[in-house]
C-alpha cells in the first residue's frame, strides 16, 4: 500500500500506438516505445507509468487492458499522454472505464482522431510498407479509417470534466526518410500536411496546442533519417515531453 504522500501525487500514464512494445520486445527485449522518456523526465511531482497493450488489437480491447492497469494505481488524479492510436484507446478508456472520474486530462500526440486515408492504401495496394502493415497491424488498423473514426467520434463523446489537448507532427516529403516519402505525398494530396501517417487535421482534438517539426516516429524519439541541423532532425523529443509534462502539472487557466 502506498503512503498518503504517494497517493497525493498525480499519475501520468503514457499510452503507446498501434505497433507497441509487446510485439517488438520479442525480438528486442530492451525496447522502449517512448524512447528515453522515463530517464529524461525530471519531475518528483508525479509518478510515471508506461503500460503495454496488445499491439494490433481493437480499441475496445486495448482500452480494457488499460482499465485494469489504472485500476491498480493509487493516485487520486490521473493524466493520460497518448501517441497515435493510443489517443483513441485513451478516449474510449475515459468514456467507458473511469467511473470514479480520476482521469483529469488527456494529451494526444499524432493521434488519428479522424482516421487516416493511408489505411485504404495499406489495405488495397502492394508494397513493402503495405505488406509489413498488413502482417503486423491487422485487425486494429482497420479501426483507423476515416469512416470508422467518424463513427467512433459519434459513439465516444468527450467528458466535460476532462481537459483534452492535442499536438501534431509535420514534415514535408523532402525531409522524410525514404521509407516514408511515398505515403507522405499520398497523404498530402488527400488530407494536407502530415507526419507520414497522420494528417495535422486528423490529429487536432480538443485544445490544439500546436504542430512540431517531426515525423510520426520522431514524436516518440525514433528517427529513421540522417541527422541534419538545417531541418532540425532529429526532433528534440525529450525537451518536448518535459515541457508537456510541466504543462500538465502546472496548467495555465
Image: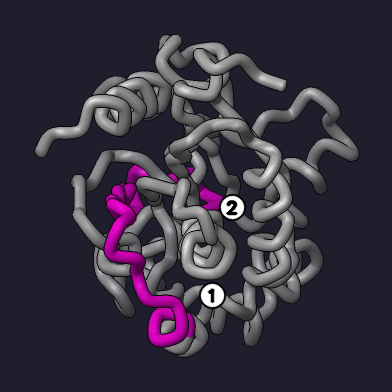
Return the residue at label 2: 17
Kindly check if marks 1 and 2 are in contact, taking CB atoms under 8 A apart as contact. no
| Label 2 crowd bin: few (<14), some (14–19), many (20+), radius 10 Å | many
* Front-most of residues 15 and 183: 15
Number of marks in the image? Answer: 2
- Residue 102 visible: yes
Q: Give me the residue at 24% from left, 61% from top.
A: 206
Q: Is residue 69 left or right of residue 253?
A: right
Above/below status of 83 relative to 87: above
* Front-most of residues 179 and 242: 242
Residue 58 location (% of width, % of height): 69, 71
Q: Which residues are magenta?
A: 152-180
Of all residues, the one furthest to the left in this rendering is 253
Question: Sequence order check: which comes first, mark 1 or mark 2?
Answer: 2
Residue 42 location (% of width, % of height): 42, 10
Q: Give me the residue at 79% from left, 41% from top.
A: 24
Q: Give me the residue at 61% from left, 15% from top.
A: 3
Return the residue at label 1: 144
Q: Quadrant of residue 52?
A: top right
Above/below status of 227 relative to 212: above
Amino acid at each position: 500500500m502506498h503512503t498518503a504522500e504517494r497517493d497525493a501525487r498525480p499519475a501520468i500514464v503514457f499510452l503507446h500506438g498501434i505497433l507497441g512494445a509487446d510485439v517488438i520486445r520479442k525480438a528486442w527485449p530492451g525496447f522502449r516505445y517512448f524512447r528515453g522518456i522515463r530517464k529524461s523526465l525530471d519531475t518528483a511531482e508525479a509518478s510515471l507509468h508506461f503500460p503495454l497493450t496488445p499491439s494490433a488489437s481493437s480499441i475496445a480491447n486495448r482500452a480494457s487492458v488499460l482499465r485494469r492497469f489504472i485500476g491498480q494505481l493509487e493516485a487520486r488524479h490521473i493524466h493520460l499522454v497518448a501517441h497515435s492510436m493510443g489517443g483513441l484507446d485513451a478516449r474510449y478508456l475515459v468514456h467507458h472505464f473511469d467511473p470514479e472520474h480520476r482521469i483529469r486530462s488527456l494529451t494526444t500526440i499524432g493521434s488519428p482522431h479522424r482516421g487516416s486515408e493511408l489505411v485504404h492504401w495499406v489495405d488495397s495496394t502492394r508494397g513493402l510498407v503495405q505488406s509489413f502493415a498488413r502482417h503486423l497491424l491487422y485487425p486494429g488498423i482497420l479501426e483507423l479509417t476515416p469512416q470508422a473514426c467518424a463513427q467512433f467520434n459519434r459513439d465516444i463523446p468527450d467528458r466535460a470534466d476532462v481537459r483534452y489537448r492535442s499536438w501534431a507532427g509535420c514534415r514535408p516529403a523532402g525531409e522524410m526518410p525514404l521509407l516514408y516519402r511515398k505515403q507522405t505525398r499520398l497523404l498530402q494530396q488527400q488530407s494536407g500536411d502530415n507526419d507520414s501517417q497522420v494528417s495535422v487535421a486528423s490529429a487536432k482534438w480538443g485544445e490544439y496546442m500546436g504542430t512540431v517539426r517531426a515525423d510520426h516516429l520522431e514524436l516518440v524519439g525514433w528517427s529513421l533519417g540522417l541527422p541534419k541541423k538545417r531541418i532540425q532532425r532529429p526532433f528534440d523529443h525529450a525537451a518536448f515531453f518535459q515541457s508537456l509534462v510541466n504543462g500538465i502539472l502546472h496548467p495555465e487557466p
